[in-house]
Amino acid sequence: MVSTTVNVVRYTALLSGLVYGWYHNRTLRAAHEQHKFEHAVHHREQLIKQAKEAWAKKQAGTAVRYLVITNPDDPRFDLEKLLTKWEAAV
């Protein structure tokens, strides 16, 4: 027969293992959720950065089109740029 002391030690070890497992699982899940959140934030920041760069490129391209001088008396007048602008508008 098994003594009472051995049974108490056995069940105490089993209960301690269950509590430790529950606590460890909880901390691992919290760390994983934090990592997922940080990854999502980083991904959003990258998307915003890419969108800003694309918008800047688009604005730079449209700014060149609108900076065409249409006054023939201006010394910076360029007929080729004016014709290119008109072709792009059509």
Image (cartoon, rainbow, N blue to C red):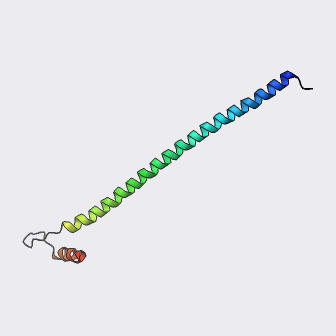
User: Of all residues shown, which one is farthest toward the left?
Assistant: 73
Residue 82 percent location from the top left of the image: 17, 74
Q: Quadrant of the C terminus?
A: bottom left
Q: Is residue 90 above or below residue 22?
A: below
Q: Is residue 87 left or right of residue 7?
A: left
Lateral position of residue 48 relative to residue 23, left or right: left
**Residue situated furthest right in the rendering:** 1
Q: Quadrant of residue 10?
A: top right
Q: How many numbered callouts?
A: 0
Side of 50 where 69 appears, left or right: left
Q: What residue is drawn where x is 10% and y is 69%?
A: 75
In which quadrant will I find the N terminus?
A: top right
Observer-nearest residue: 1 or 90?
1
Q: Determine which quarter of the picture holds residue 80.
A: bottom left
Q: Residue at x 61, y 40 (%)?
A: 28
Q: Is residue 64 above or below residue 21?
A: below
Q: Nearer the viewer, residue 79 or 3?
A: 3
Task: Identify the residue at horizontal 37%, vertical 57% (top origin).
Answer: 51
Picture quadrant of residue 76: bottom left
Residue at figure coordinates x 42%, y 53% from the top left: 46
Vertical position of residue 41 compared to residue 78: above or below: above
Residue 41 position, x and y percent, is 45, 47
In this view, 67 is above or below 21: below
Q: Is residue 40 left or right of residue 86?
A: right
